[in-house]
Amino acid sequence: MSLFNDAGQQQTLVRPGQVNQAGDINAMAIAHYSGVVEHTIQRKSVLKDMIPMQRVVGTNKVTDFAIGETDLQKVVPGEAPAGQTVDFSKASYTVDTVVNARAVLPLLEVFQTSYDARKEIGIEHGRKIAKHTDQSFFIQGVKAALMTNSRFFDAGTGRDPAGWQAGSKVTLANAADATDPALLYASISSLFVQMETKDVDPRTDDIMLVFRPAEFYALQEAEQIINGEYITSDGNKLANTMIFKAYGCPVVSSNNLPNTVIAGHLLSNAANGNAYDGDFTKVTGLALSARALLAGETIPLTSDVFYDKQYKSWFVDSHLSYAVGPNRAEYAGVILKP
């Protein structure tokens, strides 16, 4: 229906979405993504603020170097001290996979939906990405704890760099011990004894204990557990998260701690020896420090929304590309069922 003024003259409408007032009335519309993916992953991820992620650009490898311990010697009067050997080594992981979440929205239905579908999709993307990244980090944390040598072990010399050691593990006497508060708490003590013999201080080295919900809530019945607050590496508290402490270390609950057989993980391939696959059915709990893992990303979490003319549809995308693997195995420990 046309608009007319009191004099009977037709009114001119301004269409702010057109280019020079011609053509598609939505031509200048800007696709807006509210960032809910990032917000959701921040809330849902246990490890996002704990494990530093190195930027991997100009190469596909994230590399770390190891230096071994040095020896001491006493000075003998009249003799020059001898030079001591120092071990050096390096290891790397390859960033070779882009993980993507995509939703395709038909053009007409985008305009006819009464709610913001992109926001709801972003929340689901965030949840799925948080689960994926946390699980991949926990997988490598468990593998670090199960290592019988450091990741810098050299098959040629048959040894690790001096001072670099294996992970730690405690095996429960019975599967039912996993939900016995006293026995589960005692297993943490045994695990920390092993770690401290490797010069790892669980408290000052920021060890976090992770259990799945059944074990986490069973552990809360142990009289020694106290309430506490967990501070991330950037000084912020984890919001809306119930944190307890055992032996001064935070204890958190996560469904993403693997406890099944994982095969065909999105980040596994022949080049990395299917590094993210494995049998995790016996995993009960994980002790982990940021130093236990080495992680790098080429593409950080990126969200986008765009219109494709060929498909006449809107695409909502979230993608990232990263790799993670064991670093200092002695900073990881695992509690296993028999």
Image (cartoon, rainbow, N blue to C red):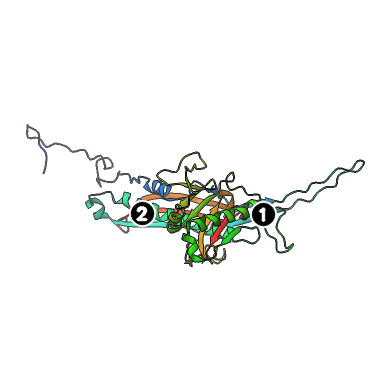
Specify the farthest residue to the top: 7
For the N terminus, the image quarter is: top left
**Image point (57%, 66%), residue name:** 273
In the image, residue 126 above or below residue 271: above
In the image, residue 306 above or below residue 272: above
Residue under label 2, please give it: 124
> Residue 282: horizontal and vertical position, in percent?
51, 65
**Mark-to-mark CA distance, 1 and 2:** 39 Å
> Could you tell me if residue 306 is visible in this image?
no
- Mark 2 neighbour density, 10 Å: few (under 14) some (14–19) many (20 or more): some
Which element is circle 2 on?
A: helix
**Image point (29%, 46%), residue name:** 27
- Which kind of residue does numbered mark 2 sit on? Glu
In the image, residue 23 above or below residue 266: above
Dots 1, 2 in contact, CB < 8 A = no
The part of the image, by quadrant, that contains residue 29 is top left
> Residue 15: horizontal and vertical position, in percent?
23, 40
**Image point (39%, 53%), residue name:** 127
From the viewer's side, name the closer residue of 145 and 249. Answer: 249
Viewed as shown, does residue 154 lie left or right of 295?
A: right
From the viewer's side, name the closer residue of 283 and 314. Answer: 283
For the C terminus, the image quarter is: bottom right
From the viewer's side, name the closer residue of 158 and 7. Answer: 158
- Mark 1 neighbour density, 10 Å: few (under 14) some (14–19) many (20 or more): few
Specify the farthest residue to the right: 78
> Residue 233: horizontal and vertical position, in percent?
52, 42
Tag count: 2
> Residue 241: horizontal and vertical position, in percent?
42, 46
Viewed as shown, does residue 300 lie left or right of 105?
A: right
- Which kind of residue does numbered mark 1 sit on? Lys
Which element is circle 1 on?
A: strand
Residue under label 1, please give it: 90
